[in-house]
Amino acid sequence: MGPQHPARGGEMASATDTPGPPKIQLRDVSVYYGETAALRRVSLPMHAHRVTALIGPSGCGKSTLLRTLNRMNDIVAGARVEGDVLLDSQSIYAPGTDVVAVRRRVGMVFQKSNPFPGSVFENVAYGLRINGVRDRREIVERVEESLRAAAIWSEVQDRLHAPALTLSGGQQQRLCIARALAIQPEVLLMDEPASALDPIATQRIEELIHALKKSYTIVIVTHNMQQAARISDVTAFFWMGQLVECGRTEDVFTAPRERLTEDYVTGRFG
């Protein structure tokens, strides 16, 4: 595959019909695990109030890219990031950056729901407490607000002190989304958030994502082509650590510019 075309960043900016600078801007980002390049020179804007889907076969760099957006690769031994990631035009990789503050602004929901062993309430309150919120009334209000935002309040309001692990898989994932929302991030990263869920629970998560984009910038990794087509505004297709194509989701799925993209979204490989 040939080199990524630098002009595509400009094309993307207009393709989203979104005025103003992007919320997140990747500039020539490469990520290495030891000597192995997992991502190579990716430049990509991500705009506020949009869902950007990252698609591509396993091992193409999607989750690696997601982790660069809140510096989660910092905790991976041997990982090295080159290039830059800008959040509101400020580098999150600049010397002296407060990584905890970055992760407060850029929340993450993982593929496997991972509630803590404690109660439903404590799962959401935990992030508030470690971020210094001490006022009991504020914690109670923020927990309810977050559970409502994650579309699960009506299901758990009478069982806030029940163990979180007694919830269904879909409820646990929405609880984890509420936990991420509680600290009031600006960006929400989601790594295959519905891959372990049944179709009904998946639909609930997709409806939730659609509602949340009014308030957040959302970046989602998914292997599910139909899901990407349903929920995202922008789709970026990756292949072997490189960004092949990025544009409006409708265009990527119905009129891709690259043959490799067409082969992937039509199921010829992957």
Image: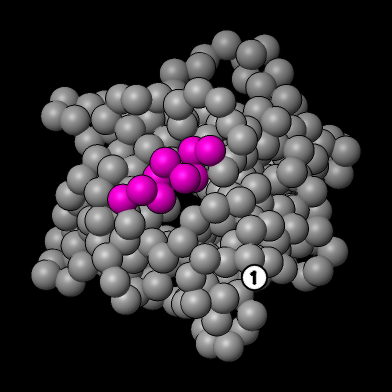
11 left or right, relative to 135: left
The extreme bottom residue here reads 268
Q: Residue 25 placed where, x, y %?
A: 38, 38
Q: Is residue 153 above or below residue 145?
A: below
Residue located at (33% from left, 57% from top): 5
Q: Which residues are magenta?
A: 6-14
Q: How many numbered markers are drawn?
A: 1
45 left or right, relative to 216: left
> Which secondary structure is most common in the magenta stretch?
helix
Closer-to-camera residue (187/152) = 187
Residue located at (64% from left, 80% from top): 266
Q: Residue 90 placed where, x, y %?
A: 30, 25
Q: Residue 126 placed where, x, y %?
A: 53, 33
43 left or right, relative to 33: right
The answer to whether residue 52 of the structure is visible from this angle is yes
Q: Secondary structure at mark 1?
A: loop
Q: In the image, is residue 225 part of the stretch drawn in magenta?
A: no
Q: Is residue 44 above or below residue 103?
A: below
Graded by Cα atoms within 10 Å as few (under 14), some (14 to 19) or many (20 or more), the crowding at tag 1 reads some
**The quadrant where residue 194 appears:** bottom right
Q: Is residue 182 above or below residue 112?
A: above
Closer-to-camera residue (187/116) = 187
Residue bearing the label numbered 1: 224
Amino acid type, mark 1: Asn
Q: In the image, is residue 7 part of the stretch drawn in magenta?
A: yes
